[in-house]
Amino acid sequence: MGKASIVMAFLFALGLYGSTAYYVGHKLFRWLHFLFPHLNGFIFSIIYSLIAFTLIVGFIPFPGTFKHIANWLGSYWMGFFIYFLLFFVLLDIVFIVLRLLNVSITSALQFYGGLAVILLTIGFVSYGLYNAAQLKHVSYSVSFDEKTAASGMKIVLISDLHLGAVNSENRLEAIVAEINRLKPDLVCMPGDIFNDYFGSIQKPEKAIETLKKLNATYGVYASLGNHDAGKTFSHMLNFLEQSNITLLNDEYTVIDDRLILVGRLDPNPIGGYGELKRKDIGHLFEQMNPDLPVVVMDHTPINLDDYGEEVDLILSGHTHKGQVFPGNLITKRIFEVDYGHYRRNENSPQVIVTSGVGTWGMPMRVGTNNEIVSIHIR
């Protein structure tokens, strides 16, 4: 994508957010005006605009306390904004239908309709905050036909830690403890370990010490996701090295002569991987022992056509399964598989897509879970 296209996409997104934020703000002001008839519209607009603006500031990578505060406010506002927008639009649709049925839309009906939107939004956001603090376990059993060398191995899969996002560091110790409790043979992290900007991590040294406690028979391996990139990419690489996490960049390694593990670069890194570019790795498969199962970590599950019979299992994340309803309805339309265990046909590799162990943007989960995945090879 060229610079002109990036600028146009940014302006479109900014315009879309600006118009929808105005719509939500207008609806909120009208409802508040029922309770406070003398509410000053100018003061409300200033306060509301500052809150709405934090969402934009949260995406700008610069250091400092202001950035941290804006990121915190913007992340929570994102959750409120999504549900305010959703429920106000639904309310307007209901009012349109009622008008078509010649039902009078009284002030009382507008007030209680707005109240319903407020209460539903608070309810969904509160549940989302609570649910995002929970860790769920998901388990799959897979077999690789006549390739039995890896039989009995347990792989623990986590994706989308998004270190630097709101609350991401708070749950890191619990994630590591839960993984260790599972006693994995291998831990795989297919991308988005970071949240675009390394400087957003509040206590990187503590995070490193926590990740170093991961205990797996054959080690901890990672591939890069679209958010593991940008101007602070070198800091990310150093962080992974200090955390004893082995990074595979379009490379493979043989695990105990039982399994071949491949790590792919994501095709769309935000800000780039410096000199690194995703490349065709077809030649690598020619070097591999055909009797060993091949497992590929590829962050985004959009590249299934890149793999054929030479690959047995693909591990992905990225989708978050939409993270908050109705996002899951969107990811189902975008991706061939946005979550779970999938196989296109008998000549295709198996795919496991996790909803992730962390959150991006708003620290909320509605209709999805933060999960740790156990894969038992039979």
Image (spheres, rainbow, N blue to C red):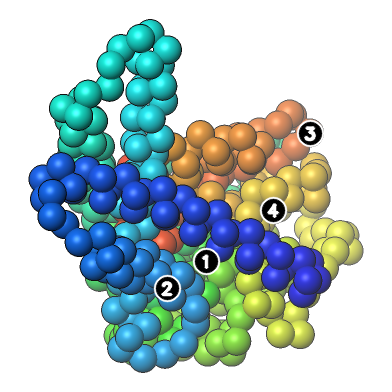
Q: Amino acid at mark 4?
A: Val
In terms of secondary structure, where does tag 4 sit? Answer: strand
Q: Report which residue position mark 1 lands on.
A: 192
Q: Give the Cα separation between the discs numbered 2 and 1.
A: 17 Å
Q: Which sits in the foreground, 64 or 283?
A: 64
Which residue sits at x=23%, y=36%? Answer: 114
Location of residue 163 with respect to 313 vertically, above or below: below
Whether the residues at callouts 2 and 4 have beta carbons within 8 Å, the answer is no
Q: Amino acid at mark 1?
A: Asp
Q: Give the Cα separation between the discs numbered 3 and 2.
A: 44 Å
Mark linked to residue 294: 4
Q: Report which residue position mark 2 lands on.
A: 58
Which residue sits at x=63%, y=65%? Answer: 11
Q: Report which residue position mark 3 lands on.
A: 347
Residue 97 at x, y percent in the picture = 40, 16
Q: Between disc 3 and disc 1, whose residue precedes?
A: 1
Q: Give the Cα separation between the discs numbered 2 and 4.
A: 39 Å
Q: Amino acid at mark 3?
A: Asn
Residue 330 at x, y percent in the picture = 55, 38
